[in-house]
């Protein structure tokens, strides 16, 4: 989730975005008592707040829009690759290639404004997610303990990362980790599926018979980035009050997270390929940052990353900001090379 204020009309919303970021963050800092489950019960009457792994409720912050203020999507439509005319060659898409189904691409021009897509691919119920404030985009299997869950955007943040909720039990879930943190499914772990972010041209060339998500029927400024310049900031928005990453790694630097290890993207981009810790990471140009220029298609090239094992099989991973990796995995390993 985000302070994205995705529900605002286009005119002048960039200025309101930053003003809202400051005002809301300041209010939360001055009034920590608002972090109160008895108050949140108004929005989430089914959530069991007695079950939680959150040590201090002040870790949970309101992100601006309330529950479903950023609307998650279900029953989305798809186009054949050959019929897609909106996407520029380097526009980023989340790629899901499951055996038994045509490959699917979920453009960030849509996920930036909706953050979750509930879909079903090759019989597998999936949640395609994107948190702009952390650049985190894992895809999860929606099945937990034999039940299929439907995910929405709670309107809450923890360490600047979206807190999802499931409609069925109103359990709160940490998006970057896929972990239940409040409610009936506290402690449960969603299964992360193999997926990756890639420039549109690369996906289309490899999958001419593939599919791409069609534009949703919402009045959003699709193709624009409401967080213009965000990944060039020295610090995250004020919602994040945690520690800076160690080793001098910039807070908004991208890192490739595989399990509890993080490879800084600049190191990988310089090397082109890294073989370490049983994994093979590769980088090549061709993907625009979704969090740079006002128009996503004009974002600077951050490259396409693939992560495979020694046998060449793709591995689940995430490309996230360094501050988020450190916040959620403070004892994680930083793969800095020499």
Image (tube, helix red, strand yellow):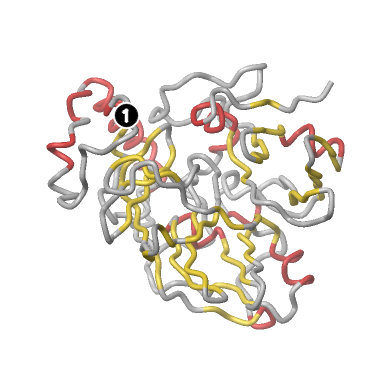
Q: Quadrant of residue 291?
A: top right
Seen in the picture, residue 251 relative to 248 is either above or below; the reply is: below
Q: Is residue 242 visible?
A: yes
Task: Depth check: give the residue in front, 34 or 169.
Answer: 169
- Residue shown at the point (55%, 44%) measured from the top left: 135
Rendered location of residue 203, percent (x, y): 72, 66
Q: Position of residue 153 (x, y in %)?
A: 35, 53
The answer to which of 215 and 59 lies nearer the viewer is 59
Q: Residue at x 84, y 38 (%)?
A: 274
On screen, residue 251 above or below 265: above
Residue found farthest to the front: 145
Position of residue 110 measured from the top left corner of the image (x, y, whole percent): 49, 62
Position of residue 93 relative to residue 49, above or below, is: below
Q: Which residue is mark 1?
A: 25
- Left or right? Give the position of 155 relative to 302: left
Q: Position of residue 199 (x, y in %)?
A: 70, 59
Query: Can you say which quadrant of the picture contains the C terminus?
Result: top right
Point 51% across, 51% down: residue: 225
With respect to residue 198, does 77 lie above or below? below
Between 152 and 88, the one lying in front of the other is 152
Helix, strand or loop for disc 1: helix
Can residue 8 be seen here? The reply is: no
* Residues packed near mark 1 inside 10 Å, few (<14), some (14 to 19) or many (20 plus): many
Near-viewer residue (20 or 132): 132
Taking the image as shown, residue 322 lies to the left or right of residue 33, namely right
Q: Residue 83 is drawn in which quadrant?
A: bottom right
What is the total number of numbered labels drawn onto the structure image? 1
Q: Residue furthest top?
A: 247
């Amino acid at each position: 989730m985000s302070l994205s204020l995705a529900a605002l009309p286009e005119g002048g919303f960039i200025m309101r975005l930053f003003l809202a970021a400051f005002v809301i963050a300041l209010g939360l800092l001055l009034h920590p008592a608002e972090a109160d489950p008895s108050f949140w019960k108004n929005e989430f009457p089914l959530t069991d707040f007695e079950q939680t792994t959150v040590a201090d409720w002040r870790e949970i912050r309101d992100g601006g829009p309330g529950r479903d203020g950023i609307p998650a999507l279900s029953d989305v439509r798809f186009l054949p690759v050959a019929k897609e005319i909106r996407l520029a060659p380097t526009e980023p898409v989340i790629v899901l290639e499951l055996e038994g189904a045509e490959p699917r691409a979920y453009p960030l021009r849509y996920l930036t404004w909706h953050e979750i897509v509930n879909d079903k691919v090759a019989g597998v119920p999936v949640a395609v997610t994107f948190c702009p404030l952390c650049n985190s985009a894992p895809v999860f299997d929606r099945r937990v303990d034999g039940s299929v869950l439907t995910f929405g955007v709670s309107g809450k943040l923890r360490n600047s990362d979206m807190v999802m909720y499931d409609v069925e039990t109103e359990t709160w879930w940490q998006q970057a980790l896929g972990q239940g943190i409040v409610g009936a499914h506290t402690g449960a772990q969603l299964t992360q599926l193999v997926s990756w972010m890639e420039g549109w041209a690369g996906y289309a060339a490899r999958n001419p018979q593939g599919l791409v998500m069609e534009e949703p029927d919402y009045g959003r400024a699709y193709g624009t980035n409401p967080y213009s310049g965000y990944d060039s900031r020295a610090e995250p928005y004020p919602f994040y009050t945690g520690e800076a990453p160690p080793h001098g790694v910039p807070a908004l630097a991208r890192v490739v997270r595989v399990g509890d290890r993080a490879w800084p993207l600049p190191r990988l981009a310089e090397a082109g390929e890294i073989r370490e810790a049983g994994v093979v990471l590769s980088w090549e140009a061709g993907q625009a940052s979704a969090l740079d220029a006002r128009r996503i298609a004009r974002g600077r090239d951050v490259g396409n990353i693939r992560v495979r094992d020694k046998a060449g099989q793709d591995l689940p991973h995430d490309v996230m900001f360094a501050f988020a990796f450190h916040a959620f995995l403070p004892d994680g390993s930083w793969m800095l090379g020499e």
